[in-house]
């Protein structure tokens, strides 16, 4: 990743801090400190976390951290008084503030190239994160990247605009969708870079978040893409705003939440999962991680499982994760399907362990004229190495070229 702020560019792979194309001399620990603060700028970082991250198992004094913070501020033209970039949260820690843009390294390390486009020079995708406010004064973070006709991706559970882009879980989704379109993504309330301290986590609020992002970006007409519970949100938006949505793409979604399906066995299993989420969310617990990850990505590698575990910790608190899981159980847009006027493509993995195939098929049977595609996969989140992901991209690309 390459981060830019003000006159500065922080290049992680080359371990360089540049100002107007001139390399700035910084000590390794100062560079690592800057990287960590920028990557986690959505929150205040405690002194203890910085000690654990920068110095690992070494014991150092508070003065060592103070000197590195001072050196980092000097390197980027900041000072302890103005705190234009590194802000001190007294008694709590430090936070990087200000506008930061990030992009993928245009010259990745050999071996990391996308095999689907081997031999082609990738267009540099620059992600710019912005913020808008909803009617109830909640700040929503959204990101735009790519060029072309606009495509909004409705928020899904556990999202973080920065972390998703870096991870092997979501990066291939983002880069492929942004290859030929202006892709707009956002973190819904309670998640990622959006406001975490929120009280209204209802389905209605989720739809309002999508409405706010579309309005803030000033999009009159756009394609809309939903994943998982984002499918129901997308359907509701398309019904309310039929003249704005040109194409509706639904992947891995459900018409009715687990509590609305009148299945005692499934309800009991989901209620047990709610209890586990409240107790084990975001912890480095192999048992919980294996249980949770195996439902979403049974075909994941150890590296992907580790990223998914970190995604839990980074994106949402245990309490909000619990509340969202409960709210998802009450979703029901079955009465809205026949109102959808937008051309619709529905895709679902045949052996999805999180959301069964029948749940996705219900969208196709209820939405007039919807086209249904079954993908040969067991993963709720398709991995970049499986043929099902290539099929997904091909189907979506073909669909977006129509109508």
Image: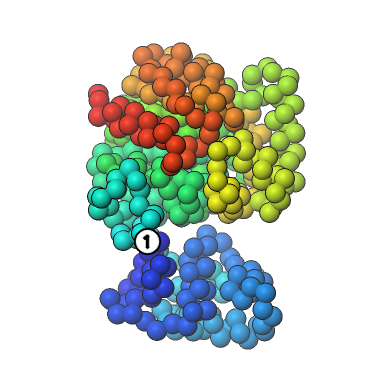
Observer-nearest of 117 and 336: 117
Compared with 180, 311 (above or below) is below
Q: What is the secondary structure assignment of the residue under circle 1?
A: loop
Compared with 55, 294 (above or below) is above
Residue displayed at 37% across by 39% down:
152
Residue displayed at 55% across by 38% down:
299
Quadrant that contains the N terminus: bottom left
Q: Residues within 10 Å of mark 1 (few under 14, many from 20)?
A: few
Residue displayed at 34% across by 76% down:
18
Which residue was labeled with disc 1? 109
The answer, for residue 116, to whether it is visible in the render is yes
Describe the colour scheme in one phrase. rainbow
Observer-nearest of 401 and 286: 286
Quadrant housing residue 98: bottom left
**Where in the figure is residue 141, as x and y percent of width and height?**
45, 51
Count up the numbered dots.
1
The answer, for residue 219, to whether it is visible in the render is no
**Where in the figure is residue 64, as x and y percent of width and height?**
61, 85
Compared with 196, 75 (above or below) is below
Observer-nearest of 183 and 302: 302
Compared with 381, 33 (above or below) is below
Residue displayed at 49% across by 79% down:
28
**Where in the figure is residue 403, as x and y percent of width and height?**
25, 24
């Amino acid at each position: 990743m390459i981060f830019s702020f003000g006159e500065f560019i922080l290049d992680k792979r080359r371990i360089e801090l540049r100002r107007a194309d001139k390399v700035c001399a910084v000590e390794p620990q100062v560079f690592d400190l800057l990287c960590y603060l920028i990557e986690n700028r959505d929150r205040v970082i405690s002194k203890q976390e910085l000690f654990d991250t920068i110095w690992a198992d070494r014991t150092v004094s508070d003065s060592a951290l103070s000197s590195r913070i001072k050196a980092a501020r000097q390197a980027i033209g900041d000072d302890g008084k103005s705190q234009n970039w590194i802000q001190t949260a007294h008694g709590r820690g430090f936070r990087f503030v200000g506008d930061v843009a990030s992009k993928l390294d245009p010259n990745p390390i050999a071996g990391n190239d996308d095999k689907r486009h081997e031999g082609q020079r990738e267009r540099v995708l620059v992600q710019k994160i912005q913020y808008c406010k909803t009617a109830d004064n909640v700040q929503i973070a959204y990101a735009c990247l790519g060029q072309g006709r606009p495509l909004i991706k409705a928020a899904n559970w556990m999202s973080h605009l920065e972390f998703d882009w870096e991870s092997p879980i979501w990066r291939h989704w983002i880069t492929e969708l942004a290859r030929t379109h202006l892709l707009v993504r956002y973190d819904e309330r309670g998640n990622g870079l959006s406001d975490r301290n929120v009280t209204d986590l209802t389905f209605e609020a989720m739809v309002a978040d999508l409405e706010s992002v579309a309005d803030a970006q000033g999009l009159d007409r756009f394609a809309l893409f939903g994943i998982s519970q984002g499918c129901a949100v997308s359907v509701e938006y398309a019904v309310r705003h039929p003249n704005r949505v040109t194409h509706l793409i639904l992947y891995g979604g459900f018409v009715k939440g687990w509590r609305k399906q009148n299945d005692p066995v499934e309800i009991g299993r989901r209620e047990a999962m709610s209890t586990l989420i409240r107790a084990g969310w975001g912890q480095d617990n192999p048992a919980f991680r294996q249980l949770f990850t195996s439902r979403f990505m049974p075909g994941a590698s150890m590296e992907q499982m580790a990223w998914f575990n970190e995604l839990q910790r980074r994106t949402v608190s245990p309490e909000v994760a619990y509340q969202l899981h409960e709210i998802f159980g009450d979703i029901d847009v079955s009465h809205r399907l026949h109102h959808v006027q937008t051309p619709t493509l529905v895709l679902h993995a045949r052996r999805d362990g999180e959301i069964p195939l029948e749940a996705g098929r219900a969208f196709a049977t209820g939405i007039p004229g919807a086209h249904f595609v079954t993908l040969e996969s067991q993963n709720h989140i398709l991995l970049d190495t499986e043929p099902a992901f290539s099929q997904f991209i091909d189907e979506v690309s073909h669909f977006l070229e129509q109508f």
